[in-house]
Image (cartoon, helix red, strand yellow):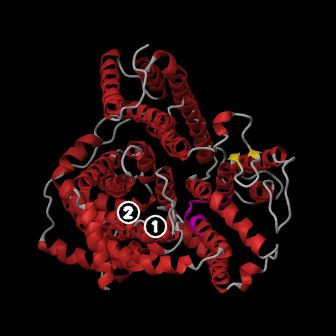
């Protein structure tokens, strides 16, 4: 059977590429293309999206013609914890200052791996906060808010 | 020839100024420090450390970045030898025999061999830059837009060959990089492209959040997934200096590796990885007893180590003289130069000779520093390897966040980095290597501008690429490269090469 799915990973990759390409086409729908001699803002995006769509389709084609690995397990804990930690840092930095933003960052980020015990965690927090204030605020003179 | 020495003399004057010497020292030190950490390769290291160079003068910043780069490269070899964890693909070959030597209690000898071979290679490759840079830049001054387009296509195809896995996916990554580079206001028409009405995107996506997300955050997630935060146990170190016999065996390999690396590094898409692979294959071929390879042959450390350093350094040649990055690290260097308002290309050499030659000469200084620094500090690196990842990754996270924030003092960049981190992780899960994406991102604006200009000049006639001799020649090279990847025999070899 040649039409059964033989490489789920390639199918997923091909779908992702095609969706990005089609999204690009849709966003670029109103931009002026111009002519080959007088390219306008819409020309290059459409060219790139077209090529990307071809690559996406080729990858999907390979998914049914050649054997490949299945999509490997998704590490939910690390990916969610790291993303949440960075977003929390971004949300808190301007409001509560650097020291507490770092607390949130390493506190939430810690769940990506095996969280540290309270003692070492506090030491790490103190060390990182002091180091950052010393380097970025005093050393480089960055206008950082340090305390709430 | 006298010109070369006069230029290097000028450069040495710049790079030996106390402040520049300090930047070079700090760069190699911090670069090694971060590069030694398992799972952080040169690309991630340079991306992580970009922000600390924002506040330096341009010459100092470039000297420091170059130092960070070869420090990271060397740090990667250290982890490859001690714990068999190559920081990136260019030190994969070092793993084989280097780690075997370490397990025989000869870790110190392997590290010293790697350091000395790298030093030799670095010095020779720096001379090659000094000799080959100016003529190449002279050729480049005669380039019109169609030649630039052809050159960039050669570079991008070269990057495709070196990416792991599927060629189609590698091309797709370049295209996504090109798409990302279009975000913002189009310079010609003022049209907003892919901005989603977010004011922070009007000026385009910044290089730093993109690189840090794709390479910093995504790599943390991957490392946590693979090791669950476990530490690694490095091999113990005893004697450091190679014996006379080791030395006699190693130096011809180092010379061969240097020659190979210097030549392959200049090629677009070439650089450290290809050079190291080729050097290992060559050593195995010329050895009287190929069976010893993989079991701790010192030539298997000296050859690839010399080659990857020579290749890494030689890839500065196309970057500095043509303004075309040949790999992801060079793309980062170009990004850094642009942040400092320097446009890489043939004109730097004539317009800012102190910058160009200062950076080239600093490579001599940096390579010497690397050896002086590393041999006594090997014990420290070993201890650093034992630090549990549970302490390391929060520190890296903090650095990523503040580094990105410091670019514009805007938390939007930090959020964007979080997004790119997830995207980078998705790409790796789908077996798409993100390094070509970075190349596409850096080359995007140049490619669009030159393509438009070439077409404007030829009034929309596509044959201009074939009728102008230099662009026709370059496109022929691109076509041959592309044909090579599609050939079944070459394909199999490439797969074998990436398997180990």
Could you say whether the residue bearing mark 2 is in a helix, strand or loop?
Answer: helix
Horizontal side of residue B383 vs B478, given as left or right: left
Q: Position of residue B422 (x, y in %)?
A: 60, 37
Rounded to the nearest whole Å, what is the CA distance between mark 2 and mark 1? 8 Å
Q: Main secondary structure of the magenta part?
A: helix
Quadrant location, the N terminus of chain B:
bottom left
Tell me whether the residue at label 2 lies in contact with that at label 1, contact meaning CB atoms closer than 8 angstroms.
yes
Magenta stretch contains residue A19: no
Q: Which residue is mark 2?
A: B355
Residue positioned 68% across, 62% down in the render: B449
Residue B348 badge: 1
Horizontal side of residue B111 vs B195, given as left or right: left
Q: Position of residue B443 (x, y in %)?
A: 61, 60
Q: Position of residue A105 (x, y in %)?
A: 46, 24
Horizontal side of residue B238 vs A132, given as left or right: left
Residue B492 badge: none
Report the residue that reaches farthest toward the front: B351
Q: Position of residue B218 (x, y in %)?
A: 53, 41
Which range is magenta? B158-170
Report the residue that reaches farthest toward the top: A148
Could you say whether the residue bearing mark 1 is in a helix, strand or loop?
Answer: helix
């Amino acid at each position: 059977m040649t039409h059964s799915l033989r490489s789920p990973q390639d199918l997923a990759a091909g779908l992702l590429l095609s969706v990005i390409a089609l999204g690009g086409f849709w966003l670029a729908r109103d931009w002026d293309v111009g002519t080959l001699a007088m390219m306008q803002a819409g020309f290059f995006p459409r060219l790139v999206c077209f090529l990307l769509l071809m690559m996406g389709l080729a990858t999907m084609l390979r998914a049914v013609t050649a054997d490949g690995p299945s999509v490997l397990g998704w590490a939910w804990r690390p990916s969610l914890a790291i993303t949440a930690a960075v977003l929390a840092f971004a949300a808190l930095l301007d409001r509560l200052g650097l020291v507490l933003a770092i607390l949130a960052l390493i506190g939430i980020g810690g769940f990506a791996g095996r969280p540290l015990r309270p003692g070492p965690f506090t030491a790490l927090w103190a060390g990182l906060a002091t180091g950052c204030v010393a380097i970025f605020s005093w050393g480089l003179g960055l206008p950082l808010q340090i305390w709430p | 020839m006298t010109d070369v020495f006069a230029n290097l003399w000028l450069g040495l004057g710049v790079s030996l100024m106390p402040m520049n010497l300090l930047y070079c020292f700090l760069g190699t030190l911090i670069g090694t420090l971060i590069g030694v950490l398992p799972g952080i390769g040169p690309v991630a290291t340079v991306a992580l450390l970009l922000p600390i160079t924002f506040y330096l003068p341009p010459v100092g910043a470039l000297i420091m970045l170059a130092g960070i780069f070869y420090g990271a490269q060397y740090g990667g070899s250290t982890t490859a030898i001690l714990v068999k964890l190559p920081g990136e693909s260019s030190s994969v070959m070092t793993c084989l025999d280097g780690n075997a030597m370490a397990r025989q209690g000869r870790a110190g000898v392997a590290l010293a061999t790697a350091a000395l071979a790298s030093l030799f290679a670095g010095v020779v490759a720096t001379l090659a830059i000094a000799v080959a840079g100016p003529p190449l830049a002279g050729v480049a001054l005669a380039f019109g837009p169609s030649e630039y387009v052809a050159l960039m296509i050669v570079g991008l195809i070269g990057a495709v060959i070196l990416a792991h896995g599927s060629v189609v996916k590698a091309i797709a990554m370049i295209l996504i990089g090109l798409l990302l580079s279009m975000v913002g206001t189009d310079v010609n028409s003022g049209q907003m492209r892919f901005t989603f009405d977010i004011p922070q995107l009007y000026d385009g996506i910044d290089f730093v959040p993109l690189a840090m997300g794709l390479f910093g955050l995504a790599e943390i997630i991957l490392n946590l997934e693979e090791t669950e935060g476990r530490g690694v146990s490095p091999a113990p170190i005893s004697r450091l200096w190679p014996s006379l016999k080791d030395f006699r065996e190693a130096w011809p390999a180092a010379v061969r590796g240097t020659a190979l690396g210097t030549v392959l590094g200049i090629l677009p898409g070439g650089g450290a990885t290809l050079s190291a692979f080729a050097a290992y294959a060559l050593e195995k071929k010329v050895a009287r007893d190929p069976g010893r390879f993989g079991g701790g042959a010192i030539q298997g450390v000296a050859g690839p180590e010399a080659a990857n350093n020579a290749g890494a350094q030689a890839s500065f040649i196309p970057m500095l003289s043509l303004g075309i990055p040949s790999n992801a690290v060079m793309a980062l260097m170009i990004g850094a130069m642009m942040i400092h308002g320097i446009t890489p290309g043939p004109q730097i050499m004539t317009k800012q000779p102190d910058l160009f030659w200062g950076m080239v000469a600093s490579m001599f200084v940096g390579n010497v520093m690397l050896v002086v620094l590393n041999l006594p500090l090997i014990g420290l690196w070993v201890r650093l390897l034992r630090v549990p990842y549970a302490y390391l990754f929060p520190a890296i996270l903090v650095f990523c966040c503040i580094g990105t924030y410091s670019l514009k003092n805007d938390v939007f960049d930090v959020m964007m980095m979080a997004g790119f981190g997830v995207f980078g992780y998705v790409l790796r899960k789908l077996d798409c290597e993100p390094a070509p994406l970075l190349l596409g991102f850096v080359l995007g604006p140049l490619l669009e501008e030159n393509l438009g200009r070439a077409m404007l000049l030829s009034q929309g006639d596509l044959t201009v690429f074939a009728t102008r001799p230099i662009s026709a020649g370059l496109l022929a090279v691109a076509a041959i490269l592309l044909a090579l990847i599609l050939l079944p025999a070459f394909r199999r070899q490439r797969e074998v090469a990436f398997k180990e």
